[in-house]
């Protein structure tokens, strides 16, 4: 969740609540859904909120919501702006990053921490809506350092968003020498952080003015147009993979700078004919401060909140959230609807249901009285989970400790330490594996693993039990352990290409224990499920040859039983004999 | 005649003329006195011997008695010191005499009390005079102590009572049993006896043959600790899961099952999670390398889901401005939440189309590629529940959860509005810890968004919530580190000794 650092005095100034104590201020923001997470070393408040209200990424945005909440502001906050003087020409951009937007802000005072606040907003927007600059990247420039190129169509000044040749050179931020884009990516400490975003591109994105290259989005800006606390006029550009997203990011930044006294001025974006989709050859003016309408019926508000509300209450709730509404009443049915106008900085409102949530928050959800829904249904357990439970109960009755192990494991534990060879993923050899034994099925493998300990899903549960025995050699024997749990293997006949099955594994470790001890338990278990048990001899690498049998339950081979091979026992640093068995749960169905 | 070994030994040791003490026979036969006594009574029952009893009194010196016997009685020490100091003629200061006699502590009071009682002299205003007419060498109590040390016995009952009162001796009484051979005993001995064995274990054979009547059982030490037996037990986390299932079934919920490895389509896309949502990046999720993809997902559903992502559903709805790729939706992953079961059920994939009202739940594992710490594992159990009805409100949601958590002693539920991509309104649930009274987060909930429900062709309301089972278990059991509980590093001692919950 986003956390931003806010100077408490700043918030007081911006909300006109100079006399509020810090505690009162924090109570107020909590009511909006913003939580206090502590203080920074500089004494700023760390405030955390959910990643929907991205307009709160700026202290100015939080202050706006507070003023509505206090009832000091009413009505929709839609910014005005001057006509554009500047144009961004878009031409021959890398196809991976075709969109751009921009605005000019004049007369903003960036001293007294305002610049830091702007930089924080920029970084937080990158991390959230901008998806780590991949979807949208922001560049803020000192307008006075830009020299607009004269335009053919008569507009006075223009910059150009395009691609650059790999030989292009410019001086990036925090550097004193000219670099090629390739050097920036490979050697510049900030540039290399974003190398992945452009590494696959044939040509790198670039922004030029009449002097030359001044920005290499989304990687780094040039030093020439760097913004300082003394800068007063700014040029803001954003590039990205989605026009809507960068336009909304721009709105949030413009609202923040306007709250600092900046005067907004539009920018023309002139797309060439090879721009994608609806933007081919399009001329658009940005920022886009158009509002949107969400129509919500009074009835739906009442059914969702579960209370009857009068219109005045609904209207009051809407206004305290910074929304504006027109109330409509159907002449015939008397049904009431609210046409709610949503301001351009609210990037989170997707559907009328979001308006209902805003009304609920303003009303106070905790004001609502819980009631148990008057809906009758019949509860029941899943049949398989009942079977699983019954087997577990029986095993516990036979003296086994019920275990609950991880289903993620690795090849060493699942195969090698059990004396099995890791199955080849090569299809041909997998299918010809006629000597298949319990446990050596093809594993489901995990792509980006947390650690080398968890690289596959287990194909059987006995290795997990061996691990538990291994980590408990200091505990009293006998150790009779059992697990009824999940295992899985690759299986192309399944919808997910994975066969997931419940498996029953049991082991008895003691100074004296032998084959008949485990067979006796299996006899008891199968009898209780009215199943027949046969144990024809077989060989399995995890067990002692001649003391190992196939488990045949109700005539079907479903598992294995035997005395664990001394090599396996010793490999697990265990010093007592172990007898064990494993079989498919559904054999007892 | 056949007799058990102890009885045979006692019979042989008994005499027709002389009474023989049980202790004596015990020493002679190397048996325990109580075994000999038991054998003697058993032989008397067979009329082979008679057992007579008398009470014997024994007197033993206490520790204090022993000390006075070696040193001297304190009053004698005082008397002798006084005589040496010339107190027969003139009174001597008590303080000086105490020092001379080497008395201290309790001994001073003991000396003074008995000095006067025995008429050794007088103590007045801190001065001591002695009576020259008595001599300390004739002290009867001292003589009695000496006698006892030498192993003699005291005939004079009044002296004995006096030293007993002073705590110098301990008197005890015991019943002494002696045996005499009867005529029948003599006959039996002459006819000869055979010894039966002592029996360690009672066997079915002994019981059925009636032989048990003639055998003797070896004595066991019934107070000794035995090696402890381990009972099998259900895993504590499973016990908590069982309880949750009981509660939910009782509230009318039906259990869901479904795949652990599932397509992102069911895990995320059906839940209106944009494909570029941070939770869907490889950092949080465990994607599956082999097999890579799901085969079939219903193509009409895919179309509806994609449209909902791009355009939203119904009037005034706009969807996301995020890429949507069917190929990505088909990729397999370990489910990051069990809400994938909910989406499969709502889509009619699991049990066919569902008509309201319905209540469903599951308590199954989910997987998160996240930091490991005392409350977080890569694998954890998620409690998932949802209710489908024609019309549901926030109040119904609150009422359901209030009821559920009350079963676990968690009251005073608070609903903090929050954000989830697939629910609106959404709430984090907070409740009071039953033990510590702290306000703690206990779950996440909400009403499913229309953008999720409409593509699944659900045209009524559905509310849902989720909670980590481990959290509930730790609340209920007080376990502090989940890593000790769940997984192959489990300590069997914990499983064996953890208090049963019910």
Image (tube, coloured by chain):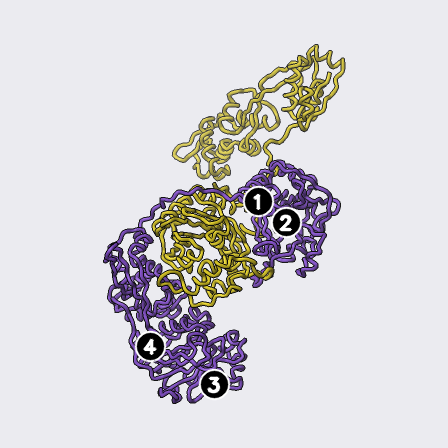
Chain colours: A purple, B yellow
Q: Quadrant of the N terminus of chain B?
A: top right
Label at residue A402: 1
Pointer 1 or 4: first along the chain: 4
Q: Is the Cβ of the residue at disc 3 closer than 8 Å to that at disc 4?
A: no
Pointer 1 or 2: first along the chain: 1
**Which residue does the numbered mark 2 point to in the structure image?**
A462
Which of the 4 image quadrants contains residue B194?
Answer: top right
Q: Which sits in the foreground, B280 or B480?
A: B280
Label at residue B486: none
Q: Position of residue A418 (x, y in %)?
A: 68, 53
In the image, are marks 3 and 4 on the same chain?
Answer: yes
Q: Chain of mark 4?
A: A
Q: Nearer the viewer, mark 2 or mark 4?
A: 2
* Mark 2 Cα shell of 10 Å, populated few (<14), some (14-19), many (≥20): many
Q: Chain of mark 1?
A: A
Q: CA distance from mark 1 to mark 4?
A: 64 Å
In the image, are marks 3 and 2 on the same chain?
Answer: yes
Q: Which sits in the foreground, A391 or A413?
A: A391
Q: Secondary structure at mark 4?
A: loop
In the image, are marks 2 and 4 on the same chain?
Answer: yes
**From this viewpoint, is residue A113 visible?**
no
Q: Compared to B66, does B287 lie above or below?
A: below
Q: Secondary structure at mark 3?
A: loop
**Which residue does the numbered mark 3 point to in the structure image?**
A171
**Which residue does the numbered mark 4 point to in the structure image?**
A112
């Amino acid at each position: 969740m986003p956390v931003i650092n806010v100077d408490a005095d700043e918030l007081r100034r911006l909300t006109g609540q100079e006399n509020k104590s810090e505690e009162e201020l924090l109570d107020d923001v909590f009511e909006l859904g913003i939580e206090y997470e502590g203080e920074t070393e500089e004494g700023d408040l760390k405030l955390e909120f959910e990643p929907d209200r991205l307009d709160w990424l700026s202290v100015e945005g939080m202050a706006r919501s507070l003023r509505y909440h206090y009832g000091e502001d009413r009505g929709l906050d839609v910014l005005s702006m001057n006509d554009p003087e500047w144009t961004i020409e878009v031409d021959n951009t890398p196809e991976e990053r075709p969109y751009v937007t921009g605005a000019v802000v004049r007369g903003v005072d960036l001293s007294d921490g305002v610049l830091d606040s702007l930089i924080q907003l920029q970084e937080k927007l990158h991390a959230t809506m901008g998806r780590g600059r991949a979807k949208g990247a922001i560049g803020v420039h000192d307008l006075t350092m830009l020299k607009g190129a004269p335009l053919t169509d008569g507009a006075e000044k223009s910059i150009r968003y395009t691609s650059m040749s790999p030989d292009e050179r410019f001086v990036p931020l925090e550097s004193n020498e000219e670099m090629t884009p390739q050097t920036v990516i490979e050697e510049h400490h900030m540039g290399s952080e974003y190398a992945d975003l452009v590494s696959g591109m044939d040509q790198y994105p670039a922004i030029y003015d009449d002097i030359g290259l001044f920005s290499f989005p989304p990687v780094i800006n040039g030093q020439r147009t760097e913004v300082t606390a003394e800068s007063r006029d700014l040029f803001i550009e954003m590039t990205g993979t989605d026009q809507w997203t960068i336009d909304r990011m721009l709105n949030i930044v413009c609202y923040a700078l306007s709250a600092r006294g900046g005067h907004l001025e539009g920018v023309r974006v002139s797309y060439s004919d090879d721009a994608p989709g609806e933007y081919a050859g399009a001329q658009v003016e940005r920022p886009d401060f158009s509002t949107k309408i969400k129509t919500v019926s009074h009835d739906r508000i009442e059914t969702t909140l579960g209370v009857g509300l009068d219109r005045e209450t609904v209207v009051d709730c809407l206004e305290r959230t910074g929304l504006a509404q027109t109330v409509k009443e159907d002449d015939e049915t008397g049904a009431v609807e609210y046409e709610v106008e949503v301001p351009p900085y609210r990037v989170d409102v997707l559907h009328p249901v979001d308006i209902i949530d805003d009304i609920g928050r303003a009303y106070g959800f905790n004001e609502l009285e819980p009631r148990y829904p008057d809906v009758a249904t019949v509860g029941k357990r899943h049949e398989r989970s009942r079977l699983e439970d019954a087997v577990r109960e029986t095993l516990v009755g036979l003296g086994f400790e019920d275990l609950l192990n991880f289903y993620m494991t690795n090849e060493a534990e699942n195969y090698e330490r059990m004396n099995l060879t890791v199955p080849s993923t090569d299809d041909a050899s997998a299918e010809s594996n006629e000597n298949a034994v319990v446990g050596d099925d093809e594993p489901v493998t995990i792509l980006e693993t947390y650690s080398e300990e968890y690289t596959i899903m287990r194909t059987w549960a006995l290795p997990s039990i061996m691990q538990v025995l291994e980590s408990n050699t200091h505990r009293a024997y006998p150790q009779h352990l059992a697990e009824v749990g999940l295992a899985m293997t690759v299986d192309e006949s399944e919808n997910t290409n994975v066969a997931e099955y419940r498996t029953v594994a049991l082991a008895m470790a003691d100074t004296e224990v032998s084959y008949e001890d485990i067979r006796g338990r299996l006899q008891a278990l199968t009898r209780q499920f009215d199943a027949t048990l046969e144990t024809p001899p077989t060989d399995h690498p995890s067990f002692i040859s001649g003391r190992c049998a196939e488990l045949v339950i109700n005539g079907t081979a479903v598992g294995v039983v035997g005395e664990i091979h001394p090599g396996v026992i010793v490999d697990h640093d265990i010093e007592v004999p172990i007898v064990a068995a494993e079989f498919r749960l559904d054999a007892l169905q | 005649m056949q007799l058990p070994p102890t009885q045979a030994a006692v019979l042989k040791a008994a005499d027709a003329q002389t009474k023989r003490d049980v202790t004596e026979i015990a020493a002679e036969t190397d048996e325990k006195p109580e075994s000999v006594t038991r054998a003697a009574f058993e032989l008397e029952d067979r009329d082979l011997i008679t057992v007579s009893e008398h009470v014997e009194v024994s007197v033993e010196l206490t520790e204090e008695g022993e000390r006075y016997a070696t040193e001297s009685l304190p009053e004698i020490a005082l008397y002798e010191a006084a005589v040496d100091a010339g107190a027969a003629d003139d009174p001597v200061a008590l303080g000086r005499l105490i020092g001379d006699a080497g008395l201290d502590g309790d001994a001073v009071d003991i000396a003074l009390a008995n000095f006067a009682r025995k008429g050794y002299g007088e103590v007045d205003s801190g001065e001591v005079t002695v009576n020259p007419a008595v001599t300390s060498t004739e002290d009867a109590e001292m003589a009695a102590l000496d006698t006892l040390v030498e192993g003699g016995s005291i005939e004079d009952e009044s002296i004995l009572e006096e030293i007993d009162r002073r705590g110098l001796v301990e008197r005890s009484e015991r019943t002494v049993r002696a045996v005499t051979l009867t005529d029948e005993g003599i006959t039996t001995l002459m006819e000869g006896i055979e010894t039966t064995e002592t029996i360690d274990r009672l066997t079915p054979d002994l019981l059925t043959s009636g032989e048990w009547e003639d055998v003797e059982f070896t004595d066991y030490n019934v107070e000794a600790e035995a090696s402890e037996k381990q009972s099998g037990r259900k895993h504590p986390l499973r016990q908590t899961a069982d309880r949750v299932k009981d509660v939910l079934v009782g509230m009318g919920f039906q259990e869901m099952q479904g795949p652990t490895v599932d397509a992102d389509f069911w895990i995320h896309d059906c839940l209106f999670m944009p494909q570029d949502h941070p939770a869907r990046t490889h950092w949080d999720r465990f994607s599956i390398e082999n097999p890579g993809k799901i085969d079939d997902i219903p193509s009409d559903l895919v179309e509806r889901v994609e449209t909902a992502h791009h355009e939203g559903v119904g009037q005034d709805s706009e969807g996301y401005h995020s890429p949507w790729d069917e190929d990505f939706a088909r990729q397999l992953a370990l489910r990051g939440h069990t809400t994938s079961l909910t989406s499969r059920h709502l889509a009619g994939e699991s049990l066919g189309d569902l008509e309201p009202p319905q209540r469903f739940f599951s308590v199954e594992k989910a997987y998160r590629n996240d930091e490991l710490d005392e409350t977080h594992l890569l694998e954890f159990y998620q409690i998932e529940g949802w209710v489908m009805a024609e019309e549901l409100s926030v109040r119904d949601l609150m009422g359901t959860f209030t009821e559920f958590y009350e079963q676990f002693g968690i009251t005073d539920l608070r609903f903090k509005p929050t954000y989830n991509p697939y629910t609106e309104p959404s709430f984090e649930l907070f409740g009071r810890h039953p033990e510590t009274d702290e306000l703690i987060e206990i779950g996440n909930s909400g009403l499913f968004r229309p953008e999720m429900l409409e593509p699944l062709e659900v045209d009524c309301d559905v509310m849902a919530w989720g909670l980590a089972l481990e959290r509930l278990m730790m609340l209920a059991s007080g376990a502090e580190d989940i890593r000790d509980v769940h997984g192959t590093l489990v300590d069997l001692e914990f499983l064996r000794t953890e208090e049963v919950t019910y």
